[in-house]
Image (spheres, rainbow, N blue to C red):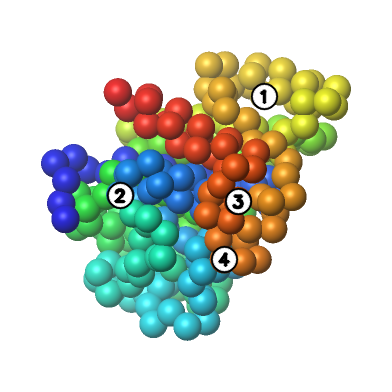
Amino acid sequence: MKGDFLAKVIAVANQKGGVGKTTTSVNLAACLGAIGKRTLLVDIDPQGNATSGVAIDKRGVAKSTYNLLVDGDKVETCLVETQYKNLHILPSSLDLAAAELEIADLPHREARLKNAILPIKYNYDYIIIDCPPSLGLITANALTVADTILVPIQCEYYALEGLSQLMNTVRRVKRQYNDSLEIEGVLLTMYDGRLNLTQQVVDEVKKFFPRKVFKTVIPRGVRLSEAPSFGMPVIYYDKSCKGSVAYTELAKEIVSKER
């Protein structure tokens, strides 16, 4: 089914591990699907946690984002429909770990993901890309195809560490490959309002990114950490928990900006 508009492509990126990047990619994509938006989740992290997070066995996929990036396979041959509403995935596989080296010498190496996804951009409202925790060539591919970048930041010491590096990468990609790349927003994750430290981090992040911090914050939550081991986005695991409510709010906040 084709829409009249091209999908909005959002890359979820932060080279720091453990900030809630995959949690955000999976749950934002699932919540956009649940509120009626046709959504594609693209897993370009070799760990493949976004793939298993929507109950797809990464060892069992016939074709993955590796085949898109390295072999130039057609995107339709790699698409997998998940069991969740309005949600498809381009799964990752373990082979992806070698992709960085394998595409290094290929022509238009930063645009391989962009060229692969282009034919299906009319089929979706949103495309969410889960990037690897590094600033290499695979992340550059995501930023080259993305309209915006969403940066998850956890509320703890060293939250802003490495962010200037990430912003330098964004500026470089913007200058060389994608002049329309913008920041979608900064998402505060693992939020605990009772801690003084949390408030300090929030203030610091707002200084670093004026007017770019989402109103929605993602709280720490047991259900949020349990859901992936069942291959379920949190909204399908426990619809009423704080994590589900927060990611649904985030999806609505992103959609409301489009209007």
**Residue bearing the label numbered 2:** 38
Q: Which mark is residue 205?
A: 1
**Residue bearing the label numbered 4:** 231
Q: Nearer the viewer, mark 4 or mark 1?
A: 4
Query: In the rendered structure, which amino acid carries the disc numbered 4?
Result: Gly
The residues tagged by marks 4 and 2 sit, at their Cα atoms, a distance apart of: 20 Å
**Residue bearing the label numbered 3:** 238
Q: Are marks 2 and 3 in contact (CB under 8 Å)?
A: no
Vertical arrangement, residue 249 with respect to residue 2, above or below: above
Query: In the rendered structure, which amino acid carries the disc numbered 1?
Result: Val
- Which quadrant of the figure has residue 164? top right
Image x and y of residue 97, in percent = 55, 71
The reply to whether residue 225 is visible in this rendering is yes
Q: Secondary structure at mark 2?
A: loop
Mark 4 or mark 2: whose residue is earlier in sequence: 2
Task: Answer left or right for 46 relative to 196.
Answer: left
Image x and y of residue 86, in percent = 34, 54
Camera-nearest residue between 125 and 206: 125
Q: Secondary structure at mark 3?
A: loop
Mark 2 or mark 1: whose residue is earlier in sequence: 2
